[in-house]
Amino acid sequence: MKSARVAVIAAAAIVIVAAATAAVTVRAQPKDTPPTPMPEMDHMLHMHESAASDLRQLVPLPILMQQEMLANMRDHLKTLNTVIGEIADTKFDAASCLLEAQLGMSSLPAHHAAELAPYFPAPMQQDGTAMHHAASRLAIALQDASVTRTFDSMRKVNAALHDVTSTCVACHAAYRLR
């Protein structure tokens, strides 16, 4: 069981690293020292340069839909993070319920998928559907693991979690909103 928990924690680390959009450097300071202001940086120039060299397909959306889509993506990441924590705490039923409600096929109406999908290229629509299907399969694997807590059931949970995050990584590697 300990090796399964280590595997889950490793998977969580991979998800968090894969989802990160920018590197942040943290500098330690003495406890009683006020925060040091960040020096003025030309980060906007770097953002412009990286956007110009970004080879992902731009998916133009009206600004309000773009904001909704980005909010959905942040919610997906928050849900995955919570699910991973529940798995680490062996709360498989809670993780399964949350996952299906927030990311599984049952969640499509809540995310306004039918309204957003027509704006996406067909392969992006397929990637999104694949993620929701993978989330539902993970929810089932979690239900199974709740009943039969074996190494094999945890292996299936980890494989299903990998399927979910793989669809996220593939879509984010291929498409951008801005």
Image (cartoon, grey):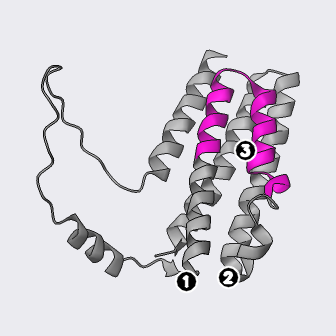
Q: Which residue is mark 1?
A: 60
The secondary element bearing badge 1 is classed as loop
Q: Which residue is mark 2?
A: 119
- Sequence-earlier tag: 2 or 3: 2
Magenta segment's dominant SS is helix
In the rendered view, tell whether residue 130 sits above or below residue 140. below
The secondary element bearing badge 3 is classed as helix
- Crowding at dot 3, Cα within 10 Å, few <14 / some 14-19 / many 20+, comes out as many
Along the viewing direction, whichever of 37 and 14 lies nearer the viewer? 37
Name the residue type under label 2: Tyr
The residue located at (80%, 72%) in the rendering is 114
Magenta region:
78-107
Nearer mark to the viewer, of 2 and 3: 2
Name the residue type under label 3: Ala
Q: Which residue is mark 3?
A: 160
Magenta stretch: includes residue 99: yes
Along the viewing direction, whichever of 154 and 130 lies nearer the viewer? 130
